Amino acid sequence: MDLQLAGKVVFLTGASGGIGRALARVFAAEGCRLALHAHANIAWLREFITAQNWQDRALALAADVADPDAVHAAMDAAAKHFGRVDICVANAGKWPQPDEMIHQISVSRMRHTIDVNLYGAIWTARAFFSHLKPRSDNHGASLTFIGSTAGRFGERGHVDYSLSKAGLYGLVRTLKNEITQLDPFGRVNMVEPGWTVTEMAREALDREGTIRRVVKTMPLRQLARAADIARVVAVLSSPAVSRHISGEVVTVAGGMEGRLLWGDNDIDEAAVRARARES
């Protein structure tokens, strides 16, 4: 199926992370031009672009998403380089460790997590909206936030992360109404991953028993791969197959319900690990 993404310009934050890299690969495979953002890993991102042989289609942009001026400057640079921005994916985020209850979390950690995960998404959307203009083919713009099941079910020891992702619901529900004031066919959605095998989650997933504990809540006894998330984002970004989808949250978490579905003996942790490594 042709997603009609070829030639579209995608602005992607957090492109140096696991889900970000998968997003870049999926959109590149669809023929998109890529404005790829990173902060601390910008040098690595430039090397990644070269390694993928994307020099003719990708631009590396450095910015701290917690800084609204920096995000706006990055979006300005992308629009100037490519002529416009059609698709935006607010993916940048952090999941701080260690596990700490609300009375243990420092004020600085609480604020920084919210600054990056929630305000970073706000500033990204704000910058994207400032450049929106309708296309002559009526292929509406698309903005997708990367949320988390922690924003729906909560997550013990990570109240900062949970509330930062829960705040994205308000953005989706409001911006779906605002985007059409700038682009009549513009759409805003969110993809909500559960436990996904990325560098950010690897330390936690490597702890004995973590995989068994999290998979107990999923009818599908497996972990998501970054590509699983990226493919759903590409579908939601498509003006062909998702032209009438806006204001929605798509959960990619194996059917997670927030309740126990399996016992310890029902989970083969080694098999779950092996399947997560499959491409």
Image (cartoon, rainbow, N blue to C red):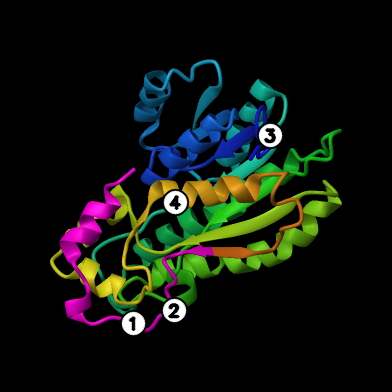
Q: Is residue 62 left or right of residue 213?
A: right
In the rendering, at what x and y percent does residue 261 appear?
33, 82
The magenta stretch spans which residues?
251-279
What residue lies at 29% left-to-right and 56% top-to-bottom? Answer: 201
The residue singled out by tag 2 in the image is: 257
Q: Are marks 2 and 1 in contact (CB under 8 Å)?
A: yes
Give residue 261's mark. Answer: 1
Marks 1/4: CA–CA distance: 22 Å
Marks 3/1: CA–CA distance: 43 Å
Is residue 160 in the magenta section? no
The residue singled out by tag 4 in the image is: 228
Circle 3 Cα neighbour tier, 10 Å, few/some/many (<14 / 14–19 / ≥20): many
Q: Secondary structure at mark 3?
A: loop
Going from the N terminus, do you reach mark 3 or mark 1 first?
A: 3
Q: Amino acid at mark 3?
A: Val
Q: Amino acid at mark 4?
A: Asp
Q: Are marks 3 and 4 in contact (CB under 8 Å)?
A: no
Q: Secondary structure at mark 4?
A: helix
Q: Amino acid at mark 2?
A: Glu
- The tally of labels here is 4
Marks 4/2: CA–CA distance: 19 Å
Going from the N terminus, do you reach mark 3 or mark 4 first?
A: 3
Looking at the rendering, in which quadrant would you find the C terminus?
top left
